[in-house]
Image (cartoon, rainbow, N blue to C red):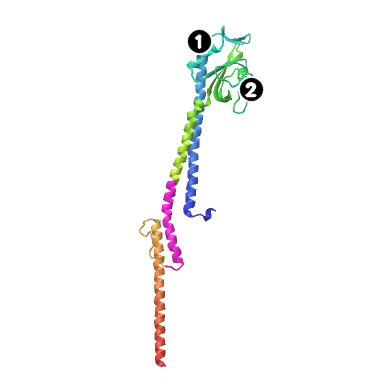
């Protein structure tokens, strides 16, 4: 199929493919870098927010956490929404969710109906695994992106420990994915858009210069086709050029001059033959 295309078309297609590969090679690593930096910034911000949350509780009391009568306490202070709500003024776009053991106690977030009763299994990572129970049971912190409250969120979970160092609950902070990734996604989209526009502009310029460069070749090919059929061209184009195309035009001009000379010689020979024939006929006529 490519063999049937003109040289100009083949060079244009090759330029397009080269530009696409170059654009992908430049844009994708940059977009991936933006993605990784944004994710790292989101996690670091949640770690910082979690420090604010626990500093807030430490300011209330430094006594251990405990469960009494199915209620969660920090020392003598019962953990209720009224106790937690002031945290939202400290870290505005973060919602606070409190767990007693691994059961949801309350949350400042708007939880869709049907999730409160069996919420823990719905807190899953990218592979669909429940992440809350291992955190509470193992006493480990967790900062990651998960699906929670029916949407993508960046979360931080940190267990709360009793006087014996045993986890008795957990504090989870959540921030919508869009709060961190909205701008990053816009940057990546803009990068892709700019890359496409630049590719189109470069391709258009390349196509223009390719056609401008190859157009003289087409002119010379047309002259050579006419010469091959025995025609004599009135003039050879592009003789004034000082590049390879000019040299090619001068070579074609040499062929053209040689063919013109051969045709002149052929006409002269035919004319001479006609003159000789006429004289012969005249002499024979006189003899008769």
At a point 42% along the width and 49% down the height, the residue shown is 208
Q: Which residues are magenta?
A: 204-231
In the foreground, 108 or 91: 108
Which numbered marker is on residue 22?
Answer: none
| Numbered disc in front, either 2 or 1 | 2
Q: Position of residue 234 (x, y in %)?
A: 38, 65
Q: Residue 136 lies in what quarter of the image? A: top right
Q: Is residue 98 visible?
A: no
Looking at the image, is 103 positioned above or below residue 229?
above
Q: Residue at the far top: name it.
A: 76
Name the residue beneath numbered marker 2: 121
- The correct choice, above or below, for 191 with respect to 141 in the image is below
For the residues labelled 2 and 1, the Cα–Cα distance comes to 33 Å
Outermost residue toward the front in this view? 113
Q: Which residue is mark 1?
A: 59
In the image, residue 20 lies at what x, y percent? Answer: 49, 43
Q: Secondary structure at mark 1?
A: helix
**Residue drawn at x 40%, y 68% as measured from the top left:** 258
**Regarding mark 2 in the picture, which secondary structure is present there?**
helix
Q: Earlier in the sequence, mark 2 or mark 1?
A: 1
Q: Quadrant of residue 161?
A: top right
Of residues 135 and 288, the one drawn nearer to the viewer in this rendering: 288
The picture places residue 69, in percent across and down from the top left corner, at 63, 8
- Using residue 267 as the reference point, say whether residue 47 is left or right of it: right
- 229 falls in the magenta region: yes
- Give the dominant element type of the magenta stretch: helix, strand or loop: helix
């Amino acid at each position: 199929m490519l063999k049937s295309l003109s040289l100009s078309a083949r060079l244009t297609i090759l330029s397009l493919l080269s530009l696409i590969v170059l654009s992908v090679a430049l844009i994708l690593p940059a977009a991936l870098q933006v993605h990784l930096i944004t994710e790292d910034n989101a996690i670091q911000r949640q770690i910082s927010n979690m420090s604010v949350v626990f500093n807030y509780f430490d300011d209330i009391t430094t006594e251990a956490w405990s469960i009494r009568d199915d209620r969660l306490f920090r020392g003598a202070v019962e953990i209720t929404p009224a106790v937690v709500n002031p945290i939202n003024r400290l870290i505005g776009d973060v919602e606070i969710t409190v767990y007693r053991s691994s059961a949801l106690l309350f949350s400042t977030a708007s939880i869709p109906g049907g999730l409160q009763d069996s919420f823990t299994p719905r807190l899953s990572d990218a592979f669909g695994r429940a992440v809350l129970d291992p955190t509470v049971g193992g006493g480990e912190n967790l900062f990651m992106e998960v699906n929670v409250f029916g949407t993508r969120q960046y979360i931080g979970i940190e267990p709360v420990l009793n006087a014996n160092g045993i986890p008795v609950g957990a504090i989870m902070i959540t921030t919508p994915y869009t709060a961190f990734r909205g701008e990053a996604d816009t940057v990546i989209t803009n990068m892709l858009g700019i890359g496409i526009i630049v590719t189109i502009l470069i391709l258009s310029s390349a196509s223009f210069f390719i056609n401008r460069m190859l157009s003289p070749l087409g002119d010379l090919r047309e002259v050579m086709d006419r010469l091959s059929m025995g025609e004599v061209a009135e003039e050879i184009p592009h003789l004034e050029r000082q590049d390879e195309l000019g040299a090619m035009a001068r070579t074609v001009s040499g062929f053209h001059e040689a063919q013109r000379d051969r045709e002149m010689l052929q006409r002269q020979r035919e004319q001479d033959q006609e003159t000789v024939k006429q004289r012969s006929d005249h002499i024979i006529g006189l003899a008769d």
